Amino acid sequence: MNRRIILALIIGVLASLVYAQTEVTVFIGSRQNPELIGSLLEQFNAANPDIVASYELGGTTSEVQQQYLNTVLTSKSDDIDIFLIDVVRPATYAAAGWAAPLNEYFESEAAMMEFLDQFLPGPVNANLIDGTLYALPSYTDAQFLYYRQDLLDKYGFEPPATWDELMSQAIIIMQGENNPNLQGFNYQGAAIEGANCTFLEPLWSAGGNWRDEAGAITVDSFEGRRALNWLLNTMDVGITKPNIAETATDNSRQEMQAGDVIFMLNWGYAWGRFQNDEDSQVKGLIGVAPLPSFTGFESATCIGGWQWAINNYSSNKEAAFKVLQYMTSEDVQRVLAAQDSRIPARISLYSDPEVLAAAPHFGQFFDVIINARPRPVTPFYDEVSELIRTTVNAVLSRSISVDDALETMQTGLEDIIGN
């Protein structure tokens, strides 16, 4: 066999190998650290030469990402193979037929459940619907109370256990500092997903809920009024800025990171930004605590987090599942926790030295994380979420009264749920 034939055969074999590579497109949002996700996918590609995984970038909020995915999946497009969805979305995606069932990728149901036992029950329960698995947890989340440790130390305060303590501490510190740029308390008031938690957390911590055990809607209640009136009162006494209704999740983080906030409600990612961003004015100055409650009631926080799902219309499902296995592995979740403050969904990482060195509060507040409460669990979540967050935003912008807001939510939720 002459050299030309041998060379042609070699070229043909190499070409066939390249041609055999399966391309997998991963959809993520811009707040999910694309550079880090990209480097992790590069490592996957190096270890799996038959697959080329790359990411496509979406919107900055859960709502914008949801709108894009709705468009893609409604058209049954296979342009993306894998996507990240908020923990509240799996039931909706399962009902719509958009997320591919994952049971078939396990040898048996027992093997699948053994695998899932490595994860926290909250995200697993969100992804496992009537025995069918529709997503795997990337990371979980919860809202914490972030506070200026240096300022609390200066005035001799411990982190507040009640909402009233938070208010009184914020007033005293603001008066003492005499800084017109310093906010006492910052939270998410914009009509975004986070505004649901802005309402639910004080509602829960007043002993209320959006629904009772019998399924009846219960937002138009003493507890509902207490929650909304307390939020309005934070503006009335001056610890919260008047335009809080315009504040989204990362606006809160940016303002505290600039040194302009004493107390803030936010998700786990903020910790890493405070410590690691070059422009952070609060490195080493931030403490973390469970959310306060009203006197006599327990602290309560929203569960958050994101899940990896496979597009049910993808033509590359087997390759996509390999990417899912990798992106939900212990090694990847360790990197996300240590380098990006993403709260692990894997139980083993709460005792991992590398994770705890980067984010000590993950271990300290494990009970907070594992007991975080779900936002309304319903196939009609999109409608429920829009009603709650837009109504709460209207209250905070003072375009609707508390009584009218609660009546609007009560009747609207009854219509949506069918009570």
Image (spheres, grey):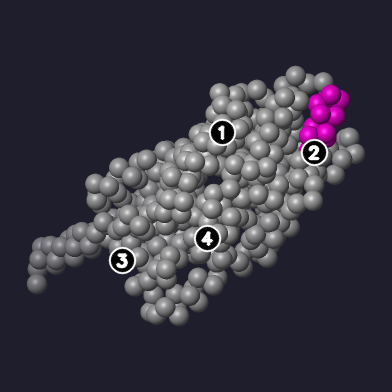
Label 4 vs 3, first from the N-terminus? 4
Q: Which residue is mark 3?
A: 318
Is residue 334 or residue 216 the one in the foreground?
Answer: 216
Give the amino acid type for the residue marked by disc 1 in the picture. Answer: Ala
Q: Which residue is mark 4?
A: 123
Label 1 vs 3, first from the N-terminus? 3
Please report the bounds of the magenta region as a residue range. 166-177
Q: Give the dominant element type of the magenta stretch: helix, strand or loop.
A: helix
Q: Residues within 10 Å of mark 3 (few under 14, many from 20)?
A: few
Q: Which residue is mark 1?
A: 405
Residue 44 x %, y %: 41, 60
Residue 269 x %, y %: 60, 46
Label 2 vs 3, first from the N-terminus? 2
Q: Look at discs 2 and 4 and give the one toward the viewer.
A: 2
Q: Is residue 160 visible?
A: yes
Mark 2 to mark 4 CA distance (whole Å): 32 Å
